Image (cartoon, rainbow, N blue to C red):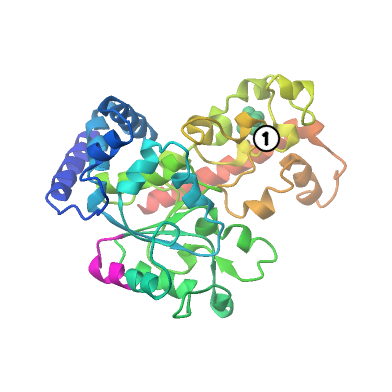
Amino acid sequence: MKQDQLYQNALKRLGELESLPDIQNKDSKDVKELLEKNGISRRDFMKWAAAMTATLALPSSFIPLTAKAAELAGRIPVVWLHMAECTGCSESLLRSDAPSIDSLIFDYISLEYHETVMAASGWQAEENLTNALETYKGQYILMVEGGIPAGDSEFYLTIGALGYTGAYNAREAAKDAKAIFAIGTCSSFGGVQAANPNPTNAMPLSKITNKPVINVPGCPPSEKNIVGSVLHYILFGVLPKLDAYNRPTWAYGHRIHDLCERRGHFDAGEFVQSFGDEGAENGYCLYKVGCKGPYTFNNCSRLGFNQHTSWPVKAGHGCIGCSEPNFWDTMSPFEEPLGNKLYATAFNGIGADKTADTIGVVLLSATAIGIAAHAAISAMVKNKE
Ligand code: SF4
């Protein structure tokens, strides 16, 4: 779609949303007041909107629209369900000593049901969920965190006083949702619950409902990818462009490796050989101590976490590939190069003694295979659009 048309569509949609009643029921009347109360100026807010517009891969002409979308976030009801998980995805967004604009925007969203942050418990919590699904039937965004035990093992995740299973709750909530997001790797791909031998038969959300699910993986995903997903929906009201694994390409279109700050050292053949060595002190590439950045599609190397403070590679540990399907099985051991595993498995044990010293050939061929497969699947998906 041409940019002009995209812009006009977003403008029309925001106009429609503006005419809807604000359903958020927080203390602050509007987002401006909420930001002011937390010491965030209009100027900071517009800077944030500019950064978010760039994150969403939109041109700068969209900055005022992104700001408007954030201001209208209170018009969109959100139901957030927890399944089998650690709540790290919610924590990634909500926990900070000084609230970021991302966390404030998320707070401003009309969060109709979220087990971690709501005050209700027991019967009242169950009633809240039923009410939210009824009241906002066909309008709410459903966000689900966690893998979901399925089939004969559904009962492994039994929730609340009514004794419904997680799979049942997810299916019911998905039925009348306007858009569905799987937040985090567990919900997107099964996560650690689904790692071999997957004792509870944990499944991704997309295997529980037959409605389209947008995957926002990561363990956890960054606050930008969660809030950006909501803003994109507010702006356009349609599915974003997705890759082969249903991840939005604005967030998961490039490899970690492509924009990594240590990439120059990789290209120069300068590697950390073991944690704490001189290479580590010099900030060399972490491939030989297990970095999976070359195989992992995400924007961590561009955006970082915790308000750009840091991210694993900056902190000195390699990427573990947490936004890729089945990464617990395919990317481990996390502190060894994938090249070692390829020799040990793909070549049927022949050359299992090979180590990261031989990574040149292995890495390049594995990366090439990975990229070619990704590109081919993406092309197939694109042709279907
Ligand atoms: S292998 Fe890892 S540390 Fe090295 S450049 Fe790539 S992403 Fe960065």
Q: Is residue 85 visible?
A: yes
Q: Quadrant of residue 32?
A: top left
Q: Nearer the viewer, residue 379 or 58?
A: 58
Magenta stretch holds residue 19: no
Q: Is residue 133 left or right of residue 99?
A: left
Q: Name the secondary structure under disc 1.
A: loop
The spot of residue 302 in percent (x, y) is: 49, 30
**Extent of the magenta region:** 130-140
The spot of residue 227 in percent (x, y) is: 38, 44
- Which residue is at a point 31% across and 32% down the rendered structure image? 49
Q: Is residue 308 left or right of residue 136?
A: right
What is the three-letter code of the residue carrying label 1? His
The spot of residue 112 in percent (x, y) is: 32, 60
Q: Is residue 240 visible?
A: no
Some atom of ligand 1 lies within 8 Å of the CB belonging to the residue at label 1: no
Task: Sort mark 1 into few (<14), some (14-19) or many (20+) by Cα contacts within 10 Å.
Answer: some
Q: Quadrant of the N terminus?
A: top left
Residue 324 drawn above or below residue 197: above
- The picture quadrant for ligand 1 comes to top right
Magenta stretch holds residue 137: yes
Identify the residue position indicated by label 1 in the image.
317
- Which residue is at a point 58% across and 24% down the rendered structure image? 261
Residue 150 drawn above or below residue 266: below
The spot of residue 100 in percent (x, y) is: 40, 36
- Which residue is at a point 35% across and 47% down the rendered structure image? 106
